[in-house]
């Protein structure tokens, strides 16, 4: 089972700065552990560090699946999980911006459909 490096101070700074720019305030970013299939062919799950935060009923998770390998998703409830359409990023800032933009677009579409 591969050993995934912990989230380092630079990655935490990138996340903190990106979220502060997006929300205009500091968010409580938690470093958590999660289990994922690092490769689609894996039969077993690997423990990976992840960044976790919440905003207005939406939960975000960015998983570090290896050195410079990030995956992102957001969800409202367990049965409402969404990704960005990109399986994996090699740049954390790009991953964060992508998941934030995807969620904002999703939220906007939901509001538009309710107003129609």
Image (spheres, rainbow, N blue to C red):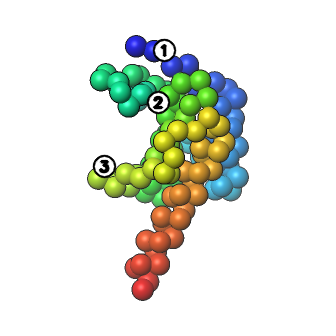
Residue 80: percent from left, percent from top: 34, 55
Work out whether 86 lies above or below 42. Answer: below
Q: Nearer the viewer, residue 87 or 11?
A: 87
Residue 25: percent from left, percent from top: 66, 52
Which mark sits nearer the N-terminus, 1 or 2? 1
Q: Distance of mark 3 from mark 1, alpha carbons?
A: 28 Å
At x 45%, y 50%, the residue is 83
Work out whether 87 lies above or below 38. Answer: below
Residue position for label 3: 78
The outermost residue toward the front is 41
Q: Nearer the viewer, residue 14 or 57?
A: 14
At x 63%, y 50%, the residue is 97
- Left or right: 90, with 77 as reference point: right
- Which image quarter holds the N terminus? top left
Label 3 crowding class (10 Å Cα cut-off): few <14, some 14-19, many 20+?
few
At x 70%, y 52%, the residue is 21
Label 1 crowding class (10 Å Cα cut-off): few <14, some 14-19, many 20+?
few
Q: Is residue 62 in view from this perspective?
A: no
């Amino acid at each position: 089972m591969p050993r995934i490096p912990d989230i380092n101070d630079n990655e935490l700074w990138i996340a903190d700065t990106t979220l502060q720019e997006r929300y205009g305030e500091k968010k409580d970013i938690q470093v958590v552990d999660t289990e994922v299939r690092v490769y689609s062919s894996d039969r077993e799950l690997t423990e990976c560090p992840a960044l976790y935060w919440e905003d207005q009923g939406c939960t975000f998770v960015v998983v570090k699946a290896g050195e410079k390998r990030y995956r992102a998703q957001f969800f409202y409830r367990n049965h409402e999980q969404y990704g960005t359409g990109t399986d994996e990023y090699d740049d954390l800032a790009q991953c964060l911006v992508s998941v934030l933009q995807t969620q904002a677009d999703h939220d906007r579409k939901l509001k538009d459909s309710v107003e129609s």
